[in-house]
Amino acid sequence: MNKSIRFIKNLKEYIAPENAEMQVIAFNILALCGVIVSIIIGCINIISEHNYIGAAADFAGATTSMALIVYCRKSGNYKMAMILTVFIVFIGMFTFLYIIQGGYHSGIPSFFIFGVVFTAFLLDGATAVVLIILELIWYVSLGLYSYYHPLTLNHDEEYYVTRVIRDMVLVALSLAITMYLQIRVYRRKQQEL
């Protein structure tokens, strides 16, 4: 068997084991998407912009997402992995990126939508409601704070426009791909019943 095909098969089995609950598979797919997006943006930051701080943050995000996949797989504690994702990635990492990329002039607010949608998709009940409200309050507060205390990054308009377009496209593609994969997993689970 070709090494690439074997790698993909092993990855699929690791991310979507046959007997795993739907939410665990969903978490793994979304975290893997986070790994891929973070690596892509990190490479873009290095190659085209020489933004090593941004790249380091992106690679740290990829590492964190991968660590959360491993934690979820080994512990079986999907809910804790998702709660950690909300605080470490959606609130912590996204806030850091928001600040270094230019605040609301950047494309990072698109990632705020990403965080809220994934939180709603993966958690349920009071935990989901509380965390979504917390995320929204935090994101709105960041926007208001940066409006009243403008960030002084001195980038030109081309910088901001490229960030907004890049991040909007990445978030849209990430949401579309992960939802497509989620629907495929759901259909597969339905056929097993």
Image: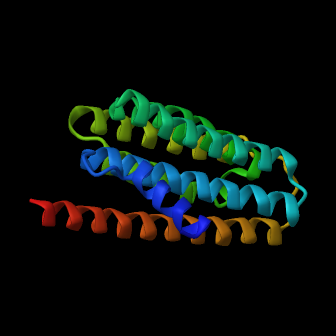
Quarter assignment of residue 128: top left
Quarter assignment of residue 158: bottom right
State the residue in front, 8 or 25: 8
Residue at horizontal 39 percent and vertical 47 percent from the top: 27
Residue at horizontal 69 percent and vertical 55 percent from the top: 39
> In the picture provided, is 51 more to the left or to the right than 189?
right
Residue at horizontal 71 percent and vertical 59 percent from the top: 41
> In the picture provided, is 42 more to the left or to the right than 91?
right
Residue 124, above or below 13: above
> In the picture provided, is 6 more to the left or to the right than 155?
left
State the residue in front, 77 or 124: 77
Location of residue 2 in the rendering, given as x and y in whole percent from the top left corner: 58, 70
Image colouring: rainbow
State the residue in front, 84 or 39: 39
Location of residue 51 in the rendering, given as x and y in whole percent from the top left corner: 86, 53
Location of residue 84 in the rendering, given as x and y in whole percent from the top left corner: 47, 31
Q: How many marks?
A: 0
Residue 8, above or below 97: below
Camera sees residue 136: yes
State the residue in front, 28 or 154: 28
Location of residue 5 in the rendering, given as x and y in whole percent from the top left corner: 53, 68
Camera sees residue 168: no
In the current view of this chain or complex, which residue is farthest to the left?
A: 193
Q: Is the C terminus in the top left, top right, bottom left or bottom right quadrant? A: bottom left
> In the picture provided, is 111 more to the left or to the right than 105?
left
Residue at horizontal 75 percent and vertical 52 percent from the top: 101
